[in-house]
Image (cartoon, helix red, strand yellow):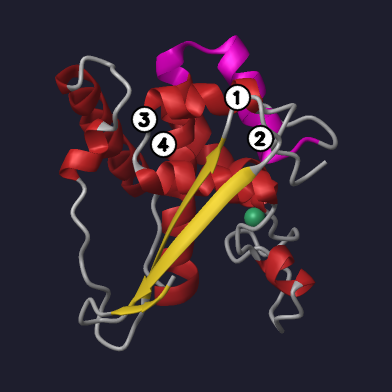
Amino acid sequence: MRGEFACIDRGFWRIVWGLQFPGKVTNLLWRVSRGVLPTAVALLRKHVIISHVCSWCHEYNEDDLHILFDCCFAKKVWHVIGLLNIVQVNMNDTVIDVLKRASTIGTEDQWVMGALFCRSIWYRRNRWVWDKLNVSVFGIKSVALNLLTDWRRMMEENGGKKGGAYARYTVWCKPPEGWIKVNIDATCHQGSEFTGIGCVTRDDRGRFIRA
Ligand SMILES: [Zn+2]
């Protein structure tokens, strides 16, 4: 079931927190786990008037599972990086189901690459939908491999210790003129069924708006 997050996925989230992904990757995983990634199908559920059809293949409904794994374009990406067999989609799977299975059948490196490529695919999807910027499989590969290189360097520098090596290197930057930026973070506590989430909104001059 989409949105399951607390009890059954604790093992999965322990892996995610332990690997200290960049915030944008953790944020993507958290949003798919809650079923709130703003795909066309998710937006339609919120009564946003938008086409439900995938903007890449123009054939299927665009939900998170389709855009990240099932779309012919996404499959090309997974094929090119050699992970197509690791991220197989079964009937009634969620994105988290696919990633959880990948974490058990692949190596840690493959799993990390899978998470980073999800983020890269979603980023490229947004550039295409909102900016009409052309998308290439190799462009996605390049972005994700850069993320992977950075992640490995940070983990080495941090000795793999908990504490967020990325936090030391991530510098907040202003959104483009006329835009606002919302930074989101979330946490779940072992032994509790509660999840915490917070967000801060700032304008294009970096001024605080609301939290
Ligand atoms: Zn598609």
Mark 4 or 1 closer to N-term?
1
Vertical side of 137 occupied by 81: above or below: above
User: Measuring 43% from the left and 43% from the top, which residue is drawn there?
Assistant: 25
Q: Is residue 103 magenta?
A: yes
| First of labels 3, 2 by sequence position | 3
Query: Dot 4 corresponds to which residue?
Result: 116
Q: Residue at x 67, y 65 (%)?
A: 58
**In the structure shown, which secondary structural element does the residue marked by tag 1 occupy?**
helix
Q: CA distance from mark 3 to mark 2?
A: 17 Å
- Residue that carries the numbered disc 1 in the rendered image: 12
* Contact between labelled residues 1 and 2, with CB atoms less than 8 Å apart: yes
Foreground: disc 4 or disc 1? 1
Q: Quadrant of residue 192?
A: top right
According to the image, label 3 marks what residue?
20
| Residue 96 badge | 2
The secondary structure type at the circle numbered 3 is: loop
